[in-house]
Image (cartoon, rainbow, N blue to C red):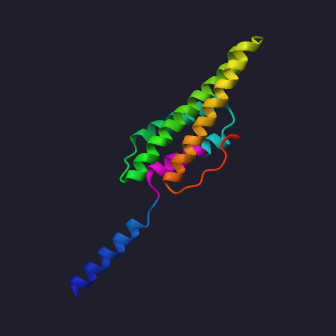
Amino acid sequence: MRRTAAAALLAVLLVAGCGSSDTSVKRDLLRGVAQIRTTHDPKRLQTELRRTLTRLRRDRASTAAERHARELATRGLEATLAGIRSRIDFTDNDSGNVEAATRDAVRADRRLARGARLLRAAGLALGIRIGPLGGR
């Protein structure tokens, strides 16, 4: 009788643990995506994404898919941060200088688009569909 109860308890615990697909990599990826979608101030977004990137780098990935997703998400957030930096440069430093403004705008667009592609690929590696990010 005790063996049966212990086996039943073990089975319940295993099933409960296996059903949890909410990993730290997935949570931090979704946190970064939400920040990109909802934070409209570039400097504030930059600060929030840096924190998320730090957390993501610390996350432990238990499967190959999670490791791949973490790598893609890390690169995606880095590219997004570079795009945000270019966007900040555009607004802070390029008043009256059309050539510099154009250069910063093109850089921002390319980096943000690359970041969005990498974040969507990270989502796919985890079985999540991530739609447009900031118009990209």
Q: Residue at x 43, y 67 (%)?
A: 19
Give the residue at the far top of this rendering. 97
Residue under the image location 42 percent in, 52 percent down: 65
* Total marks in image: 0
Quadrant where the image shows the C terminus: top right
Q: Look at the magenta stretch and give its main secondary structure.
A: helix
Q: Residue 89 at x, y = what percent?
A: 65, 19
Q: Left or right: 130 with respect to 66?
A: right
Of the pair 95 and 5, the residue shown nearer to us: 95
**Left or right of residue 56, residue 124 in this image:** right
Q: Quadrant of residue 83?
A: top right
In the rendered structure, which segment of residues is drawn in magenta? 22-33
Q: Quadrant of residue 8?
A: bottom left
In this picture, residue 70 sits left or right of residue 128: left
Is residue 52 positioned above or below 107 on the image?
A: below
Task: Judge whether residue 92 is colored magenta.
Answer: no
In the displayed structure, 7 sits above or below 96; it is below
Tell me the residue at 58%/33% (across/down): 80
**Residue situated in front as seen by the camera: 73 or 27:** 73
Q: Tell me residue 24's x, y (percent).
A: 44, 50
Give the position of the N terminus as an image quadrant.
bottom left
Across and down, in percent, residue 6 comes to 25, 79
Residue 109 x, y percent position in the rendering? 67, 30
Q: Is residue 40 above or below residue 31?
A: above
Give the farthest residue toward the bottom.
Answer: 1
